[in-house]
Amino acid sequence: MKKAIIYFGLAVGLLFNSCQNADSYLPGRNDNKGQWFEPTPYGMAYIQRGSFNIGPSDEEITEFTRTKTVSVESFWMDDTEITNNEYRQFVYWVRDSIARKLLGETFTDYIITVDNNNVPLENPVINWQERIDWRDPEIRMAIDELYIPEYERLAFNKEIDSRKLIYDYYWVDYKQAAKRSNSYNFETRKYDGAVYNSEGEVKPIENRGSFLMHESVPVYPDTLCWIRDFAYTYNEPLTLKYFSHTAFDDYPVIGVTWKQANAFCNWRTNLKVLSNKRSNDIPAHEFRLPTETEWEMAARGGLQNSIYPWGSYYTRNDMGCFVANFKPLRGNYVADSPSTTTTMKAGEFDPNPFGLYDMAGNVAEWTNTAFFEAGYETIDDINPELEYDAKTDDPLVMKRKVVRGGSWKDMAYFIRNSTRTFEYQDTAKSFIGFRCVRSSFRNDLRHR
């Protein structure tokens, strides 16, 4: 009898406590009543959500291009294109990670095999705290396969083989996961449907891992594009020095494919995730390439019916000076800059009203959007995007990606806000670079 009374008392106590804390197990309960804050990412500008007409304004309407009113959520965008210095950090990271994996086969100091509790790890991780002495003969011997083979060396110089700098990463294909035919069946407790894997093969869905796509991307820029793009020119100095020499640190990186730009975004995201974990912070959105509509909204700078990012109808300012790096007049490449005929340092000209530099000229920029002539008729009017993950064996027309902004080699028409062109995702050009964006919920969660 006494036990029954005790059990009854415990039950009443638990019931009373649960009534006092009715939402104690509800997901998303706000235990922290303080204001959430999203810090400004370094080197990025905030683009407030808004609506605009994508495509040519009334002053530049043509019979071939239509316009469409769209609404886009807020996001952060790099205030300049990714520079040689920034992309070189990515290349060095890939080089060092491969070197440490090779060194781990000989020297145990370069890999971590146990966790903090001395429990063996199933997959050892790289030890980034251990420095590499690149001049040590034993170190050089252990990573010998990372160097150019002896029969290919120029003047017997032992250099890192850039062809072996390959970045491996995974990404989730949410588009395929969202298809109703690929939904999880709770009755059979398995997935229905099939997916296209990274090689373009149709495979039945085994588990959630089927939506995980693997990419293996060579990261070193194609420096030979300076010669390839302009056959009857002498561009060897740029081929040899543009990416590697420190004098070009602040110049926009070129010679990168669309896939290489995406790989850089993934690497940058992983660095941010690691930083957030160390500071016990809530992870932010991932870095990525902008959509075509995000790019155009950012380029317009909040100005309606503007032809150029600076809000004018002309490519000169009041003093008659050109305000962007492009191809003025009849090939007078130095008219807009007395110091260079090709690319310039990022951010040399004044920014647009959003604080973004070089949204017109200098180098054209990759976007994430697939290029189709009828793209504006196809996309939705809210956060519009047209994606297609082209495979190696797909026809060229499926590999086209939208390129925006125009470059140092283009005439004024191509640096307009509304002009859209394309390039194939697996090609690298001496006039195409990129910049990253990151979605933002800055205003949405500010007072939650």
Image (spheres, rainbow, N blue to C red):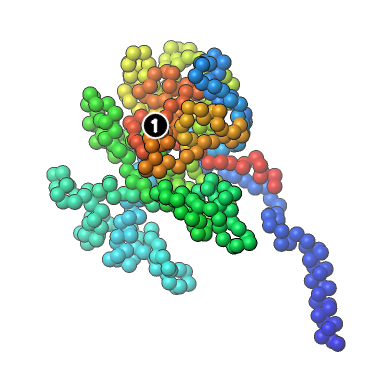
Question: Residue 60: percent from the left, percent from the top?
Answer: 52, 15
Tell me the quadrant of the picture where the N terminus can be found. Answer: bottom right
Question: Residue 306: percent from the left, percent from the top?
Answer: 54, 19
Q: Is residue 433 visible?
A: no
Q: Residue at x 81, y 80 (%)?
A: 7
Residue 242 in the image: above or below residue 20 = above
Residue 392 in the image: above or below residue 136 = above
Q: Residue at x 34, y 36 (%)?
A: 427
**Front-lying residue, 354 or 147:** 147
Q: Residue at x 45, y 68 (%)?
A: 115
Question: Residue 175: percent from the left, percent from the top?
Answer: 53, 45
Question: Residue 329: percent from the left, percent from the top?
Answer: 36, 13
Q: Is residue 22 left or right of residue 96?
A: right
Q: Secondary structure at mark 1?
A: strand
What residue sits right under mark 1 in the picture? Answer: 423
**Front-lying residue, 198 or 404:** 198
Q: Is residue 50 left or right of residue 289?
A: right
Which amino acid, mark 1?
A: Glu
Q: Is residue 361 visible?
A: yes
Q: Identify the image quadrant of residue 305.
A: top right
Residue 285 in the image: above or below residue 45 = below
Q: Is residue 8 left or right of residue 192?
A: right
